[in-house]
Amino acid sequence: MGFVVDANCEAYQVKRLFIANSSVEHNSGGGVNPRLTAQALAIRTAEKLAMKYFY
């Protein structure tokens, strides 16, 4: 994902801080509208959170 978050969108420096928007993408500076990618990333992160902390 980048230098701030791991593959599950959890921040390296602050535990239990999850960032689920297009700011974690390394190429979010422009180009094609990243709305669907951001939505898919948010859903994936929510599923990971549910599996990790609620099941």
Image (cartoon, grey):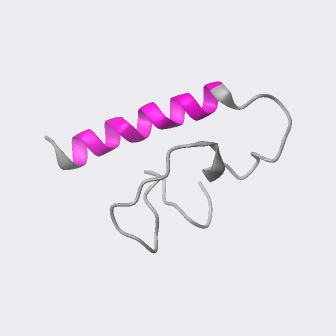
Q: Is residue 11 above or below residue 31?
A: below
The quarter of the picture where the C terminus appears is: top left
**Magenta run includes residue 42:** yes
Dominant SS in magenta: helix
Residue 48: image location, x then y, percent: 33, 42
> As drawn, is 4 to the left or to the right of 18?
right
Give me the residue at 43% from left, 58% from top.
Answer: 10
**Magenta run includes residue 48:** yes
Q: Quadrant of residue 22?
A: top right
Give me the residue at 46% from left, 70% from top.
Answer: 12
> As drawn, is 2 to the left or to the right of 53?
right
Question: Which residue occupies the extreme bottom position in the image?
Answer: 13
The quarter of the picture where the N terminus appears is: bottom right
Question: Which residue occupies the extreme left position in the image?
Answer: 55
Magenta stretch bounds: 36-52
> As drawn, is 3 to the left or to the right of 47?
right
